[in-house]
Image: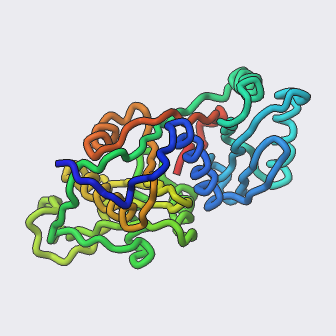
Amino acid sequence: MSVVLPVLSSNAPASDRDLLRLFYKTEIEWARHLGEETALEIGTAFANCALDRIADANRIMDVACPGDLSPIDLMTIVDTHFASQKSRCLKYVPNISAAPEQTARLVDHLRSRGFWERQLKVMKLDRYCGRPSESPDIQVVPARAVPQQTRALMADAGQQQVDAQVVEARIAHLDDGRYDLQIALTATPANDREPTSIAGSHRTPSRASACAGVLAVGEIGLIEQLFVASFARRQGLGTFMMHRAIEVCARSMFKHVLLSVEPDNDVAISLYSKLGFREIGIYREWCAPDATAVMSV
């Protein structure tokens, strides 16, 4: 069913293009969790040599190439800065508000250097279609209250190779007080032969099985880190935690609720669409040709 959340309505609806620009701004806030920020003449750089394989921690955002600067010179500026930070730039995010000629030359040059384009679909909650569900078998708690379980979940979540840098980067987002990450705890089976289903268990929930977070950026609620542990998938936990994230956004009275998703993640896109999200545009970034780099956390 469709449920209207009045606190999510806006008296001055923004265009899809405006909302896409706002999403780019939320990405800058997300990057601030991971890297040291430096304003350069051609964009905003984030560097962290301790997370040297995490692209989100070592990237330049809002980058554009002024008419009197060649792409080669721009990349020299970037490389020099990152070298001074004992790191290197793993991602370029073109400035969506810049004139096309200021980014097209740079994109062509990045492509010639072997950089590849990564796209994310950006979606906006238009109308919440659903109703939050409750389950006596699931306990939802703040991630900061269960640090050990949260760390275990972050080591399990995702499809990329998991190592210490990945886990530390995912945990680093919790240092921002504006980020509310919720953890779903379910019961631990008594032994390996017991089914891992979350339903029907009478044991006390203690195992981190899923999470979803909301970053507050002004009037925007950005939903991030929707993870379901490998042992708990296909049991409705992703839907359950999305309802919880939307509840957080409703209580916070955000005008806009945004999220991003890989274009080929059909399962997630279907879920978001059923909940009332629709695509508003494409977020684009150019990633270094480095097979050891982890592109997103």
Which residue is at 57% across, 69% downward?
A: 176
Give the image location of residue 33, x and y in percent. Answer: 61, 61
Which residue is at 63% across, 49% downward?
A: 53
Residue placed farthest to the front in the image? 11
**Left or right of residue 20: residue 5:** left
**Between residues 22 and 240, which one lies in front from this camera angle?**
22
**Left or right of residue 86: residue 285:** left
Location of residue 246 (image quadrant):
bottom left
Q: Does 212 sit above or below residue 128?
A: below
**Between residues 132 and 6, which one lies in front from this camera angle?**
6
Location of residue 93 (image quadrant):
top right
Count how many numbered circles sit on residues in the image.
0
Give the image location of residue 86, x and y in percent. Answer: 80, 53
Which residue is at 27% across, 74% downward?
A: 206
Give the image location of residue 210, x and y in percent. Answer: 32, 60
Q: Is residue 232 visible?
A: no
Q: Does 285 sit above or below residue 135?
A: above
Q: Does 13 sit above or below residue 112?
A: below
Which residue is at 28% across, 57% downward?
A: 243
**Between residues 21 and 289, which one lies in front from this camera angle?**
21
Report the colour scheme.
Answer: rainbow
Residue placed farthest to the right in the image? 68
Give the image location of residue 204, x and y in percent. Answer: 19, 78
**Left or right of residue 65: residue 221:** left
Residue placed farthest to the left in the image? 200
Q: Is residue 165 visible?
A: yes
Location of residue 159 (image quadrant):
top left
